[in-house]
Image: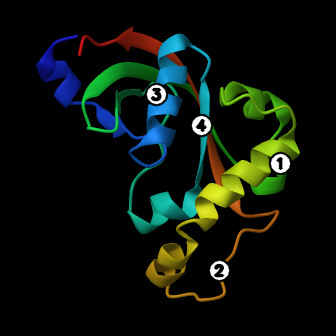
Amino acid sequence: MTDERRDELRIAEFGFPGELRDRLVAAILTGEKTATTGLLVEWELDSEPLPRPGERMLVVDSSRVPVAVVELEDVRVVGLADVDMATAKAEGEGFVSVKEWRLAHEAFWNSYADDLRSRLADPSWRLVDDTPVVVERFRLVDRLAT
């Protein structure tokens, strides 16, 4: 893929820079991670359109260096309580149950919930069973030389 074509792709960042992102990107590069889940409210706050099946995205590492291109195969919005075991496994983090997946994701999202509440101007916002989440399934298309 040419640099020019890469510049046209939306950036895909997984987790926050550091150990978490490095681990998630490594799982993408090995093919273990083929799904990710995010809060719908974040797309809404950033006025970003949801990704679409067929869209290709540029995966960056903790230094924002492009390391891969993935293609979205499925994008759906579900309630937090409706995430299934297939999604938990596809996240490539070794989750053995949906409960374990949810605890890890709630811990991550709650780590910056005060910022979300502030941006929403809603001090009562919190994660609940029907909190909308965006589940993205993808496949690795290209590993980029770094």
Q: Which of marks 1 and 2 is nearer the N terminus?
A: 1
Q: Do the residues labelled 1 and 4 touch (CB within 8 Å)?
A: no
Q: How is the image coloured?
A: rainbow
For residue 82, which numbered disc appears in the image?
1
Task: Find out whether the residues at labels 4 and 3 contact each other: C-beta distance under 8 Å.
Answer: no
Q: In this view, does 132 lie to the left or right of 60?
A: right
Q: What residue type is labelled 1?
A: Asp
Q: Is mark 1 on a helix, strand or loop?
A: helix
At label 3, which amino acid type do we have? Answer: Val
Cα separation, mark 2 vs mark 3, equals 30 Å
Mark 4 highlights which residue? 36
Tell me which label, 2 or 4, sits earlier in the chain: 4
Q: Nearer the viewer, residue 8 or 143?
A: 143
Q: How crowded is mark 2: few (under 14 residues within 10 Å), some or many (20 or more)?
A: some
Mark found first going from the N terminus, 2 or 3? 3
Mark 2 to mark 4 CA distance (whole Å): 22 Å
Look at 23% across and 16% down and name the residue there.
146
At mark 4, the secondary structure is: strand
The Cα atoms of the two marked residues, 3 and 1, are separated by: 25 Å
Measure how far apart labels 1 and 2 are at the Cα level: 19 Å
Q: Are marks 1 and 2 in contact (CB under 8 Å)?
A: no
Amino acid found under the numbered disc labelled 2: Trp
Of tags 1 and 4, the one toward the viewer is 4
Q: Name the residue under label 2.
A: 125
Find the distance from the CA under tag 4 to the CA under tag 3.
11 Å
Q: Where is residue 34 in the image (x, y as percent from the top left)?
A: 60, 23
Q: How many numbered callouts?
A: 4
Image quadrant containing the N terminus: top left
Of the image marks 3 and 1, the number of the one nearer the N terminus: 3
What residue is pinned by disc 3? 25
